[in-house]
Image (spheres, rainbow, N blue to C red):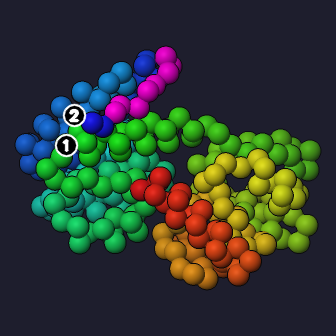
Amino acid sequence: MTKVLEVTKTERRMKMKVALCDDEPIWTQQVEEILESYGPVHFDVEIYYDPQKLLLAIKETSYDFFFLDIEMPGLSGLDLAREIRKNNSLVPIIFLTSYKEYMPEVFALQTFDYVMKPVTKEAIFPVLNRIMNYLQVQEKGLHFSYKKIDYFIEFRKIIYFEKDKRSVLINTTEGQYTTILKTDELMKRLDKRFVRVHNSYIINCFFISKLENEAVWLRQQDESPIIPVSRNYSKSARAEIVQQLKEIM
C-alpha cells in the first residue's frame, strides 16, 4: 500500500492551489478524488477542460503545481507546459498520458513527473510526496557577502556555479552573482541537489536537460549551457546525478 507522506502541523494548515487540465472529465474526476483522499494537505483544485482557458488563467493566477494531459485538441499538454515554463521554470508539472513515446519531450521540459493512465492512488501518492518534499525545501538557500553586501539566493533558483579565477560566478534564474567563497567551503553550504562535475563547475541537478559522459546540458531560460564533466569527477558525479534525477523525476 502506498503511504501518504507524514506532514508537520504547519503543512496541515497548508492550502495548495492546483491546476488540472484534461479534456476528458473521467480523468479529471479521478485525479480530483485522489487529491482529496491524499490526507491532511488541502488542495484547491481548479479544473480546465480547454487548455486555452488555462493558458489565459496562468497570466493572472499562480498555481503551486499542475496536472496536464498530454493529448488534447488544439493545444497539447506539451505546448501548454512550454508556455508555463516561459514564466515559471520551477513550478512542478505532472503529465497524464497513455503513451510512453512522449517521455523524451517530457524530460526535456524538466517536468516533475508523469503518470500513466488509468490513474491510481499508487501512482499519484508518491508524486505528491515528492512535491511536498520539494516545496518544503524551496526556502533553503545560500547566504554570502560580496563587496560588503549580504545576499541570500534560494537553492531552487541556482542553476550552476562557475569558477572564474579567484571568484565564483553564481548563475541563477534571476541573473548572475559573484562570490569569493572557496569551492570546498561552497560545497559545505549546499545540499545534495548540487554536484561538482569539474574543478570549475558545480551544477544543480534539477536543471539538467541532457546527460552524457563528458558533458551536462542545463536548462537556463532560452539557453542550454553545456557544462564539461572532467575525468576526475566523471564516475562519482554521474552516480550522484543519476541518484538525484531518480528523486526529482
The image shows residue 234 at horizontal and vertical percentages of: 65, 76
In the rendered view, tell whether residue 96 sits above or below residue 219: above
Q: What element carries label 1?
A: loop
Distance from the alpha carbon under mark 2 to that under mark 1 = 7 Å
- What percent of the width, then of the height, locates residue 158? 64, 55
Q: Residue at x 87, y 64 (%)?
A: 167
Label 2 environment density (alpha carbons within 10 Å; few <14, some 14–19, many ≥20): some
Per the image, the residue denoted by label 1 is 120
Q: Which is more toward the observer, 164 or 186?
A: 186
131 left or right of 2?
Answer: right
Does any portion of residue 66 appear in the rendered image? yes
Give the answer, above or below, for where 112 lies relative to 40. Answer: below
| Range drawn in magenta | 3-10
In the rendered image, residue 7 lying in the magenta stretch gets the answer: yes
Residue 99 image label = none
Which amino acid, mark 1? Thr
Label pair 2/1, CB-CB below 8 angstroms:
yes
Q: Where's the N terminus, which quadrant?
A: top left
Q: Which of marks 2 and 1 is in front?
A: 1
Q: In this view, does 54 lie above or below 99?
A: above
Viewer-closest of 180 and 235: 235
Please state the horizontal and vertical placement of residue 99, each as a whole percent of the image. Answer: 18, 65
